[in-house]
Image (tube, rainbow, N blue to C red):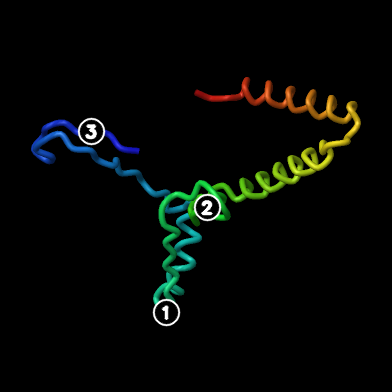
């Protein structure tokens, strides 16, 4: 997210800066925030979740911009978690070996596909 700017008339010395980015004034995110602008005049909607959460309920909390731009992300993530829970509950102690082999085979295939799709 940051880069170092060299000596110039603006910066004077080497400094770490966050590059600016443009906002699409016709994009879904800006239009949604524009709709909410009036509400902010009358009510406080400030929310500071604090630092990045890596555990507990906060680890899946997305900010409003990401929720709007990637609205299907949470739905897809929830579906994946449901499938994982079903696999996990089907593979408890005492499960038939064929079920365990089927789950292992399917997960190995999925893992191979995801490795091929990984962007570096």
Q: Where is residue 11? Give x, y as percent.
A: 13, 40
Q: Identify which residue, 96 or 115, lies in the foreground.
A: 96
Q: Quadrant of residue 17?
A: top left
Callout 3 crowding tier (Cα within 10 Å): few <14, some 14–19, many ≥20: few
User: Mark 1 to mark 2: distance in Å?
Assistant: 25 Å
**In the image, 13: left or right of 111?**
left
Indicate which disc, 1 or 2, sits on the residue closer to the N terminus. Answer: 1
Tell me the residue at 89%/27% (across/down).
Answer: 97
Of labels 3 and 2, earlier in sequence is 3
Q: Point out the image quarter for the N terminus.
A: top left
- Is 14 placed left or right of 20 in the picture? left
Of the pair 101 and 28, the residue shown nearer to us: 101
Name the residue beneath numbered marker 3. Answer: 4
How many numbered marks, from 0 up?
3
The reply to whether discs 1 and 2 touch (Cβ–Cβ < 8 Å) is no
Kind of element beneath mark 3: strand
Which residue sits at x=67%, y=49%?
75
Residue that badge 2 annotates: 62
Residue picked out by circle 1: 42
The CA distance from mark 3 to mark 2 is: 28 Å
- Work out whether 90 lies above or below 61: above
Which one is earlier in the sequence, the residue at label 3 or at label 1? 3
Q: Can you tell which of label 1 and label 2 is closer to the viewer?
A: 2
Numbered disc 1: secondary structure: helix
Residue 35 on image: x %, y %: 49, 66
Q: Residue 84 location in percent, x, y?
A: 74, 40
Determine whether, in the image, residue 31 is placed left or right of residue 112: left
Q: Residue at x 11, y 34 (%)?
A: 8
């Amino acid at each position: 997210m940051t880069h170092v700017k060299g000596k110039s008339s603006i910066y004077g010395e080497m400094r770490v800066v966050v590059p600016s980015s443009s906002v699409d004034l016709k994009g879904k995110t800006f239009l949604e925030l524009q709709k909410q602008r009036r509400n902010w005049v009358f009510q406080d909607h400030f929310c500071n979740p604090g630092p990045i959460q890596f555990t507990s309920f906060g680890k899946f909390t997305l900010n409003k911009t990401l929720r709007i731009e990637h609205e299907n992300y949470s739905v897809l993530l929830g579906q994946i978690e449901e499938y994982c829970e079903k696999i996990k509950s089907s593979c408890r102690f005492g499960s038939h070996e064929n079920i365990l082999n089927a789950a292992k085979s399917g997960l190995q295939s999925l893992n191979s596909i995801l490795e091929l799709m990984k962007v570096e």
